[in-house]
Amino acid sequence: MESAVEVQRGAAAIKEQFLTTKEQFHEFLASGRPRQSTDEADGDSEEPSGEPEQKRVRLDSDGDKKKKKRGQNKSRPHVKPQSYEDRRLCPSIVQERDTKCFYGEKCRFLHDASEYMSTKAADLSDQCYLFNSFGWCQYGVTCRFAKAHTSPELKNLRNQDLCRRSTDTVRNLLDKELQRRLRKKQERFPGAEAYLKTVSRGEKPASNREENLSGAGHTQDGADAPVKTVGPITDADIIKLRPCEKKQVDFRDKLYLAPLTTCGNLPFRRVCKRFGADITCGEMAMCTNLLQGQTSEWALLKRHASEDLFGVQLEGCFPDTMTRCAELLNQNIDVDFVDINSGCPIDLVYKKGGGCGLMTRTSKFEQIVRGMNSVLDVPLTVKIRTGVQQNCSIAHKLIPEMKKWGVSLITLHGRSREQRYTKSADWEYIDTCSKLAAPVPLFGNGDILSYEDAMKARETGVSGIMVARGALIKPWLFTEIKENRHWDISSGERLDILRDFTNYGLEHWGSDTQGVEKTRSFLLEWLSFLCRYIPVGLLERVPQKINERPPFYMGRDYMESLMASQHVDDWIQIRWCAERSG
């Protein structure tokens, strides 16, 4: 075994008895998979289940050893959401409304539930999480668990007791009337317009809101503006908040779950809240898309009831769009703070001048911060990196300026844009910057994967810790930090976490075919991080470092080995094991 197993440089140190080779690893996983039935082996076809076909793992010994192709596979098939089902049921039938079809004679959907059921993919289970939790399922017969709540007449059943007890758990939904005004560019932004006038006149913008009287129907010049108001006038409409009267948030000594694009969705944030995350933030949202009323972008602002300290993160590169977007969110959603993304390293954002690009455009950056502060009733925070170039840090120059601009919190990722994740985060530099930021709290971010990493980070002058990749690899990291211990979590407990995420995903994205496929895609995206976790009981040296690659190893049971695989077809087997164990 010693000669067959070779530990590569940069790999994590695992106890020798658990190490194995790639061939032995995949052979072991293949031995535990469900066997094909005799009918399937003979070629007898069954009814389509709607599930994707399994792929075979290609080992190094298979066929000729060709050079591995790298880069994005642009020729792969793309399935649009509306293509998950060839023939879809009309929403008026799904919702069982007595009125006529929404689309009238132009409707292209099916109106016969029996005909739809004859072509619908097979149900995944006879239990529906939505029906069991809330007393009814809004997806009716289109639900992939419809057996649990559908009568023989294909009517959607309700549990009235559960319906009475259930309440709305998600806030910040996009109002249809607001979406119509945004699309037709009829939404007014008086506070933003007043601020932008001061910028265009070359005046020094004020950091408070007293000069930006928007709710009372007055502009900064004192002239009446044709702003229509609805309802009684309150003190808040006439007298605007001063900076000292804005909502105050105590950020210090809290664990902050970073806004993670794609993976930082609402179901994942719910999982992290269960394990002790104090602050959560929505995924990065483009301000221009929000101003256009795009449904997919507004979905990033949704807030679950369990998120008691929640903010949204905006990306933009111009003062006008960012200030208007801040005023829009201030009036229409419920958040505790708004964050400016000036640390995004991807080319699409950086080349437009957003993300990390803002750090080199200090004049525009100042106008954005002051403008957003002038229209917000909640604290404004900023997330930055050490700089753009690898050996040219500029954060220490920006931080004293941002204090003057009025930011309430600064989060510093200890890497530059060019570094990405090739080197370790520079916590000595973060410590230096935290002293420059005082009394404004500064959170450090980078390479936190254990409570020991968190303890070393707290020895610096930071006010708190932001966790990003560490939470994706092990979401129970928040519990480890708060309890100062290494958690040797079992495969069964990790499987329960995946079950919870799946249930939260069905609640968030839906239990119909489209919702199931979305839940699966986000689950697979998350599993690409979860597979990097190495159980504490297998490590030769504790704790695991975030930049150490896991070698091929055998877990203490089949499920633990399955969760260590980096092949998507092995991840699909996790669902089969969940069904067998449940």
Image: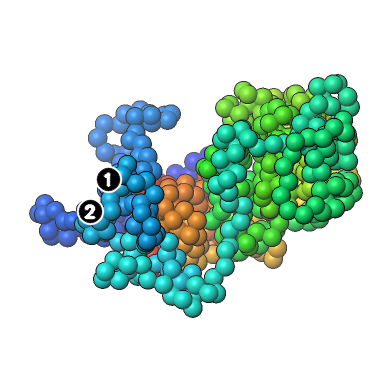
| Residue 386, numbered circle | none
Q: Which residue is mark 1?
A: 86
* Location of residue 12 in the rendering, given as x and y in whole percent from the top left corner: 54, 48
**Foreground residue among 158 and 26:** 158
SS assignment at label 1: loop
**Foreground residue among 577 and 382:** 382
* Location of residue 399 in the rendering, given as x and y in whole percent from the top left corner: 83, 35
- Give the CA distance from mark 2 to mark 1: 9 Å
Q: Amino acid at mark 1?
A: Asp
Q: Quadrant of residue 350?
A: top right
Q: Earlier in the sequence, mark 2 or mark 1?
A: 1
In the image as oriented, which residue stretches furthest toward the bottom?
161
Give the crowd class for mark 2: few <14, some 14-19, many >=20 residues within 10 Å: few
Q: Which residue is mark 2?
A: 119
Q: Amino acid at mark 2?
A: Thr
Q: Quadrant of residue 345?
A: top right
Is 410 located above or below residue 127 in the figure? above
Which residue is found at the position 82% from the left and 54% from the top? 234
Q: Evaluate if marks 2 and 1 touch, with contact meaning CB atoms under 8 Å apart.
A: yes
SS assignment at label 2: helix
